[in-house]
Each structure stands twice: as structure tokens, then as C-alpha cells.
Amino acid sequence: MFNSFFSFIFFPLIESFGIGGFVFFMSFFLTLIITLIYVNMTPQPRIKHLKQEIKELNKERSTHIGDKNVLEIINKELGRKNMEISSYSLRPTLLTIIPIFLIITWMWSSVAVIPLQENIPFKIYLFLDNTTNTYTVSSINTQGLSLLNSDSNNSLYQYTLQGSKGNYTPQWLIDNKIYNISLKITDRQEYTSSPKIIKDGIVNAIVIDYKEAKPFFGLGWFWEYLFFSILFNIILRKIMDVH
């Protein structure tokens, strides 16, 4: 349900700005939402006052290095004030953690790789289980895809295919059993799940060789998201005077 909702909301942005632009936008958008919720759910003047008191206590502690009794009193006071600040942060954290987790999970399944594109070759790997018996692929039905090349090495079979836009289900006949995997060739940010884990004693898995999307200096989308989220968090907290 959530995947369909997020896809409906966010796919137009991906198609308009690309993966890199979309991740940049989401970094700003989610950080802004989290910051606004935090500001409105926490007593900012009180937190500012507590942080100032903690700063003064740390200065005072540095002047009583040799006095264990005074240090014990200061440390207890520091712990109490830090605990109070943490208690204020708990409510906004609990409110935002589940929605943010759901969105990040959706992004992981939707923008992590580059979809299969029209008339661009891609590979499918077939992993057989030859631990007890030796199996071979009797035939392959590409279901309309063009088979450009095939190769095998012991229990690993490799196929290079390409095709026009559409949904396909290539099939393999192995030991009188048919195995398949669904795939989609499209110009949109859509792709089917892979690998398909089977492990029935004949086939271990069928894997579509999707290429990882690396929109940010050769790094994956998550590192772009993390970098810009930290950057926007620093900037927004500075602008909004968040404590």
C-alpha cells in the first residue's frame, strides 16, 4: 500500500529531475520536515538555557580537576541536564522515525538501480545447484527478447539479451522443469525485483544484472542522500536558530 502511494507521489519527480535531482530534493524536503517538527514540539528557549548551563558547567569542571567531590556533583548535574534535553527530543523522534523509515525503504527499492532500457544489452545469470547432481539447461525461451550471447561455467549460466519496451518472462527448461523470471524494459524508473531465489535442489537463483545508480560523484543514491541531509541539517538549524 505504501509503495503504491509513494510511487504515485514521487515518480513524477524522478522523471522530471532524474535520480540525482530527486535524491537531492528528498534530502532537503525530509530534513526540513524533521527540523520543523522538532522546532514545534520542543521548548526551544528551555533547551537553549540548558545548553548554556551545560557549557558553563563544563568550564567549571575544568577548574576542579583534582577535586573528586566537586567533580561528582558537577557530573551529576551535567547528566541531569543532558537527560532533560534527550527527553525533549524523544517525542519528535518517535513521530518521524516510522514515516522516514518507510520513505527510505521505498527509495531503496525504487532508485537504487538503473532500469532495463530499450535495445540496450543486459545480462541474466542462472545459478544451478550441482552439489548432488549435475544439471544442464536444455533450452531457453526468451519470450520475444533477442538473445545476443550465452555462456556457461560449471553451475553458472550467463545470458546477454536486449529488447523493446515491455514486460517479459524468459524461461529455462532444466530437468523437465520450467523456470522463469519477470522483467520490464522501460524508459521510466521502474524495474522488477532481483534476485529470484529458488533453491529447489536444481536452481539456486536467477539474477538480473541491474546496474547500480550512482548519481553523486560515482557514489550510490544513499550516500548522496546522507551527505546532503547532513549539509541541509546544519544549514537549516543555523537559519532557524534550532537548539
Image: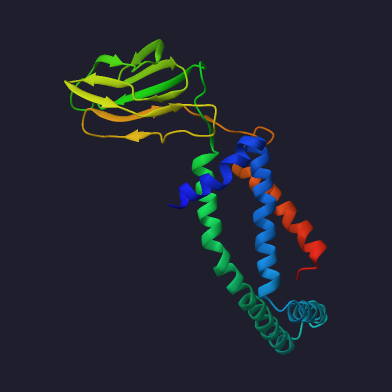
Q: Residue at x 81, y 82 (%)?
A: 60
Q: Quadrant of residue 147?
A: top left
Q: Residue at x 54, y 27 (%)?
A: 187
State left or right for residue 208 relative to residue 37.
left
Q: Quadrant of residue 15?
A: top right
Relative to 146, is 13 above or below? below
Q: Quadrant of residue 111?
A: top right
Relative to 126, is 139 above or below? above
Q: Position of residue 131 (x, y in %)?
A: 23, 27
State left or right for residue 39 relative to residue 144.
right
Q: Is residue 29 visible?
A: yes
Q: Residue at x 66, y 74 (%)?
A: 41
State left or right for residue 143 relative to residue 221.
left
Q: Position of residue 117 (x, y in %)?
A: 52, 23
Front-lying residue, 60 or 158? 158
Q: Residue at x 56, y 57 (%)?
A: 100
